[in-house]
């Protein structure tokens, strides 16, 4: 039963003590989230992993790219485990390394050495390594602004992987005009842009989040009409139109903090992942909070980490036969760390 599983997890946690560390993303289910030793957004989880030197086992409750990042940032003798290997990220899957190398070749022919690659941490270790060896950095939704600004101190233009929306929203916030942004289509292997090439400041990889794409201008229209006092706050993985129509936009940490400091009785429609929205609703009974899309939008891959998978991976540790180990090879890790460190020292 659920209770038996929970009790067994508690037992194992106390048995392993500080040898075990369970970082947990805010999008995780409550049944798993309750066991988090640390919770955070993707930036906080990267920072936390980089600091932890005690735990032999890091059982990562999040998705594959986050576990890879944790492995890259922890030491050789620390083992990172992902309770379900199917917990991937459809956005990270939208940029593979072959497409990226091919795109880079073409872009170098078009623009010479004037582009700096940046990648959202929601990308594979191989993409982070590509970015690292080409002088670029990772970004998260919490520091994209800062990192894009930095990128323009390095080169005239940027290639932003793999989320076109975070890239577009961030660049727009910094005053770059939409008409100076191009889109790279990795499937067609072509640059989507109408004007003269030299005007391009930002090249956006044509990827997106399959959760945040479900928040639409229609949802906003509906809330404005039926809840005129409601503040609308969305994650910058939502498309540009939605971000512009919303009252506020920002990372997971930003959304949590904005609602925390909002006055009692205030009303909010949130455009982000379902488990987080539900937790915010539960934590603030004094405020009226709804999901911007009434369907509530779950991240199916985040949700693959559930109680049975968490328990299973912990039992395997206790029995000395760890499974689902996430190990990034040294060559990739050494290059990826360059990109991560350029971010972490500025974040
Ligand atoms: P942050 O944790 O950086 O807000 O990103 C949200 C997300 O989609 C994680 O996969
Ligand atoms: Fe990937 Fe979107 Fe899920 Fe985050 S919410 S893990 S970006 S699919």
Image (cartoon, grey):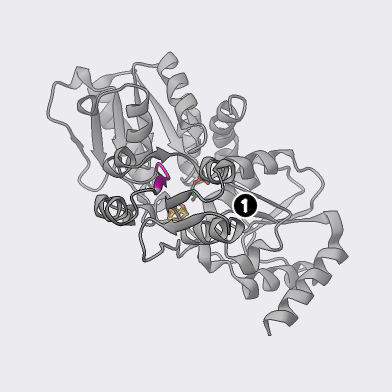
Q: Residue furthest bottom?
A: 1
Query: Above or below — where is 153 with respect to 280?
Result: above
User: Which residue occupies 45% across, 40% down?
Assistant: 127
Query: Above or below — where is 30 with respect to 340?
Result: below
Does the magenta stretch mainly form a helix, a strand or a loop? strand
Q: Is residue 1 magenta?
A: no
> Magenta span covers which residues?
231-236
- Ligand 2 is within 8 Å of the C-beta of the residue at disc 1: no
Image coordinates of residue 146 in percent, x first then y, are 49, 25
Image coordinates of residue 283 in percent, x first then y, are 61, 57
The residue that label 1 is drawn on is: 327
User: Which residue occupies 72% across, 65% down?
Assistant: 322
Image coordinates of residue 327 in percent, x first then y, are 62, 52
Q: Callout 1: helix, strand or loop? A: loop
Quarter in which the N terminus is drawn: bottom right
Image coordinates of residue 321 in percent, x first then y, are 74, 69
Instruction: Indicate left or right for 121 with 284 as reference.
Output: left
Return the residue nearer the eye: 52 or 213.
Answer: 213
Disc 1 residue crowd, few under 14, some 14–19, many 20+, Cα 10 Å: some
Marks counted in the figure total 1
Query: Above or below — where is 347 with respect to 266?
Result: above
- Residue 32 visible here: yes
Q: Is residue 232 magenta?
A: yes
User: Which residue occupies 24% across, 36% down?
Assistant: 183
Quarter in which the C terminus is drawn: top right
User: Which residue occupies 64% across, 55% down?
Assistant: 24
- Residue 271 visible here: no
Instruction: Indicate left or right for 152 with 304 as reference.
Output: left
């Amino acid at each position: 039963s659920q209770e038996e599983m929970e009790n067994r997890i508690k037992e194992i946690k106390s048995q392993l003590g500080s040898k075990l560390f369970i970082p947990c993303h805010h999008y995780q289910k409550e049944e798993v989230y309750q066991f988090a030793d640390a919770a955070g957004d993707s930036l906080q989880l990267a920072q936390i992993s980089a600091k932890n030197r005690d735990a032999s086992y890091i059982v990562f409750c999040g998705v594959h790219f986050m576990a890879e990042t944790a492995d890259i940032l922890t030491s050789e003798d620390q083992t990172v485990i992902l309770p379900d290997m199917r917990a991937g990220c459809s956005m990270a899957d939208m940029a593979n390394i072959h497409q990226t190398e091919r795109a880079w070749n073409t872009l170098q022919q078009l623009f010479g050495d004037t582009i700096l690659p940046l990648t959202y941490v929601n990308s594979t270790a191989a993409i982070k390594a590509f970015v690292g060896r080409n002088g670029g950095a990772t970004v998260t939704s919490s520091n994209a602004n800062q990192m894009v600004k930095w990128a323009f101190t390095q080169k005239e233009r940027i290639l932003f992987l793999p989320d076109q929306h975070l890239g577009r929203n961030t660049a727009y916030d910094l005053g770059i005009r939409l008409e100076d942004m191009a889109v790279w289509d990795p499937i067609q292997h072509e640059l989507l842009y109408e004007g003269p090439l030299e005007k391009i400041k930002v090249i956006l990889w044509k990827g997106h989040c399959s959760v945040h794409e479900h928040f639409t201008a229609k949802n906003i229209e509906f809330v404005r009409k039926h809840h005129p006092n409601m503040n609308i706050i969305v994650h910058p993985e939502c498309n540009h139109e939605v971000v512009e129509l919303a009252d506020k936009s920002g990372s997971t940490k930003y959304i949590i903090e904005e609602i925390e400091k909002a006055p009692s009785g205030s009303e909010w429609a949130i455009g982000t992942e379902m488990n987080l929205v539900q937790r915010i609703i539960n934590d603030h009974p004094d405020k009226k909070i709804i999901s911007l899309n009434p369907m509530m939008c779950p991240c199916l891959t985040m949700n693959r980490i559930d109680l049975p998978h968490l328990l299973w991976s912990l039992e395997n540790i206790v029995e000395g036969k760890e499974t689902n180990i996430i190990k990034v090879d040294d060559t990739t890790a050494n290059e990826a760390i360059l990109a991560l460190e350029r971010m972490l020292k500025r974040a």
